[in-house]
Every structure is written in structure tokens, then in C-alpha cells.
Image (cartoon, helix red, strand yellow):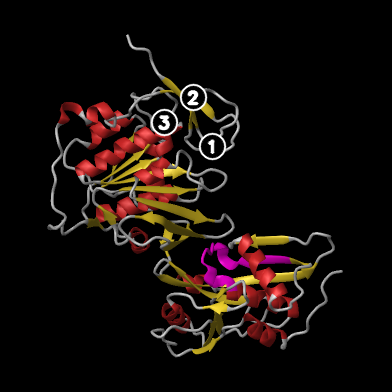
Amino acid sequence: MAKTKTSYVCQACGAVSPRWVGRCEACGEWNTIVEEIVDSGVGAGPKSATAGGRPTQLVPLAGETESAARVVSGMAELDRVTGGGFVKGSAVLMAGDPGIGKSTLLLQAVAAMADLGKRVIYVTGEEAVGQVRLRAQRLGLGDRDVSLASETNVEIILATLQQGPAPDLVIIDSIQTLWTDRVDSAPGTVTQVRTSAQALTRFAKKSGAAVVLVGHVTKDGQIAGPRVVEHMVDAVLYFEGDASHTFRILRGVKNRYGATDEIGVFEMTTLGLKEVSNPSAMFLDQRDKDAAGSAVFAGMEGTRPVLCEIQALVAPSPLGTPRRAVVGWDSSRLSMVLAVLETRCGVRIGANDIYLNVAGGLKINEPAADLAVAAALISSLTGAPLPPDAVYFGEISLAGGVRPVVHASLRLREAQKLGFRSAVTGRLGAGDKSNGLEVSEYTDLATLIGQIAAKGKPRKAAE
């Protein structure tokens, strides 16, 4: 009898070690190395892949594609993020914090698809069938034609899915609870998660059904388990939100069949998640227009223009090391803007406590917010409120210049729809249109800072 081979796998990053160690050499985490039996997984072994030496069929690139390649979910915001609906035969990984509303969103999605006559199956490994029914009744979806199952064994799930016609959509909630007989390790370990995801992805490709895998996130906000799972699936969606706000954001960070960084906005209500068709109006709701330190940023999330409020507070610091608190933006980007203001614009701001917040809990990643952040900081420092009908967007260079950004016309069009009359940005491109707004173009940041500071009363920095 052949001797069983084992390996030592880190449960945090998936790195393999030849022996047990207390600290993973790849990610630096302690006590995450677990001994696991080496196995190829469900149908994924190299021996089964090369059995018989049979060649695969080669087909030309040019050819007809399936006319109905996507399955529309019936939820406009979800279809926006996925690129127009779930692609047949694709595997999607959806992750989010516990209790954020992942199961609620997917239950509403399968109910909407059932109304369209689609065959959908909801497999849960965390709840009993009765608990899913209770949630569906609370949401008013208890009479939908949705097939439910409570199972965690991968082989049983695959055998169930292969009965009858192929479903249009399969929900697996969640991938961390699944286990397979081919791997001798506990559910949730790296090997179990990777092997289970590989088996379900293979089923999606062969059957043509769209499979959605629900994943947990770690305390750092990353998807739990090995990063290889994200490479195995076709799309990765993050469901974000804050317990202090009622809205939730579905963000696509990977999509082989659509645009990335696309967002869908939902509002959590007593009857489930409600789609928000105009998120800009929601983010700007109850904005204090006359307060110093408030600037409206015209941003882009994927292909959608979104306007939001950036709030800054500059206060004298009694400490030797001033505080820096940033919510919704990159803290290192704030340090760069402060350095440019100090060095290139001659503004003494570094000795103050600085608090920066993106109102509504939205997270901004693009550098186009530099100009809005700088304007909000100077407005708070000098006590001069910015014009309430103006939007700001532009990238700041280390030399103190203002660079133009992409999709300026879309940003200006969204601002014009919401009643804004002017915009402050870098130089517009040849094809960009002002869309009826009074656009102030700047190439030098110091010029804009001087105009804002001239309307206020500057404070002295803390000694």
C-alpha cells in the first residue's frame, strides 16, 4: 500500500511548506500552518486529465456564439455590476462582512429570476431549509418557485444539480462550509475551499449553469481562503456597507465579461434590499452647503458617474505628532496632498490635526479626488465655505499642477442633472463638453488655493 503523502499548508495565504513551522514564511502569520493530505481534488488530478493520452478538440476562433449568453437577474443594479446579467457557464464569487446582506440580496435575486421563468437552485450550508423559508416569508418572497437544499458535501451537491435539466443559476452559501471526501481536512481549510470551488467551477463550465459562490471575509476585508480561488472564478464581487448607514454597495473588482469597479447601490429596508437608481442624490442628501470644509466630488465608479461630499476638518493640534484620520479615502494619498500644499503652495497645514471623511460611507479609490480634497482642506483651514453649486475633480501632481482626468464629460453631465452650475477641474480634453456648466480650468494648484484662501480668515497653525 502506498504511503499517504502530506503537506503543510498555511490557512491564511495558501503557501505550502515542507515541514511544520510556527510562522508562515510567505505571509508572516503565526500558527496558521496545518498538515493536510495531498490529493488532486474532485476531477482535477493530473492523472485523470491525461488518462489515455486522448487529445482535445481544437475549434477556430471565428464562429457563432450563443445568442442568449447572459441570464438577466431582474435586478437592475445587480445586472449593472455583472455586466448585463450572469453569463451562462460562469462562476462568480461574492464576498462581504457577516450580516451585511449577501444572503438577502441573493435570495431576492433568485426570486426575481424565478418570476422570469428561470430554474434556480439555492444551496445553503449555514442554515436549515426552514430558516431560509422564514427569511423569504419576511421579505414577501415565500411563494416563489425556488428550489432549496441544505447540504455541505460537494459530491451530494453535484449529484443533485446533475438531476434533470441544467439550472440557470445556482447559489452556494457559503464556500467555506463545503467539504469533499477526496480531501482529508476540516471544512474551511485552504485545501477544502480550493477543491470545492474547483469542482463547482468545473460543473458550471460543463453544464452551462451560472454558479454564485458566497465567501466570507477576514478582519482585513479580504476574502478568506487562498487567493487562487479568486483566479479560478470569472467574477469577484464585494458587498460593502456600514452598520451606521442603511445603504449597501455591490462592487465588482474582477469581471471577465464586463467592466471592473462597477457599483450597484442598494438601501437596506425592513422588506429587504431596495435598489437605488440615483446614488448621487442619496450621497448628497442633507448636505450642509454653507459649512466650511465641504466639497462635492464628481467621481466615476466603473461606467457610472457618482457625486459625493468630501468633508475635511483642520483643527489646531495640542500634540507633538498631529492626528490624521481618514475615512473612505487613501491615507497615503492624503499625505501626498498635504506635502504638495506645504511645499508647492506655501500653506502651513501640516502641524494641524486633519480629519477627512467621505460622507455616506462611500469608498473612493481614484486620484481624481485630489482636487476636491485639497479644496476642502483649504476651506476648513481658512473658514471660507466653497460655492454650494460647484463640483471639483482633478489629479494633483507632485509638482503642484492639476492634471486632467478621464470621463470629464460624464462627470459634468451628472453634475448638471443634479442642479450644479459650475465645475473646477484641470484642463478639459478636445472632445470634452461642458454640458452647460461654467467650467474653471486650472493647471496650477496654487492659483486655486489662493482664490479660496482670499475669501477666508486663515488661522495660525498650532505651535
Q: Residue 191 bears which disc, if any?
A: 3
Left-right relation of 250 to 321 = left
Nearest-to-viewer mark from 3 and 1: 1
At horizontal 56% and vertical 65% (from top left) the residue drawn is 360
Q: Residue furthest front?
A: 399
For the residues labelled 3 and 1, the Cα–Cα distance comes to: 17 Å
Estimate the x, y position of residue 244 in percent, counting from the top left. Answer: 59, 58
Above or below 127: residue 269: below
- Which quadrant is the C terminus positioned in? bottom right
In this orientation, does residue 134 appear?
A: no
What's the amino acid at mark 1?
A: Ala
Magenta-colored stretch includes residue 369:
yes
The image shows a total of numbered marks equal to 3
- Mark 3 closeness class: few <14, some 14–19, many ≥20 residues within 10 Å: many
| Helix, strand or loop under label 2 | loop
Which range of residues does the magenta coloring cover?
A: 354-370
Q: Residue 18 bears which disc, if any?
A: 2
At horizontal 25% and vertical 26% (from top left) the residue drawn is 47
Estimate the x, y position of residue 439 in percent, counting from the top left. Answer: 51, 88
| Helix, strand or loop under label 3 | helix
State which tag comes first along the sequence, 2 or 1.
Answer: 2
Left-right relation of 43 to 356 = left
- Mark 2 closeness class: few <14, some 14–19, many ≥20 residues within 10 Å: few
Give whichever of 315, 138 is nearer the camera.
Answer: 315
Estimate the x, y position of residue 324 in percent, counting from the top left. Answer: 71, 61
In this figure, which residue is indicated by the disc labeled 1?
26
Estimate the x, y position of residue 407 in percent, counting from the top left. Answer: 42, 76
**In the figure, residue 132 lies in which quadrant?**
top left
Give whichever of 47, 178 is nearer the camera.
Answer: 47
- Which quadrant is the N terminus positioned in? top left
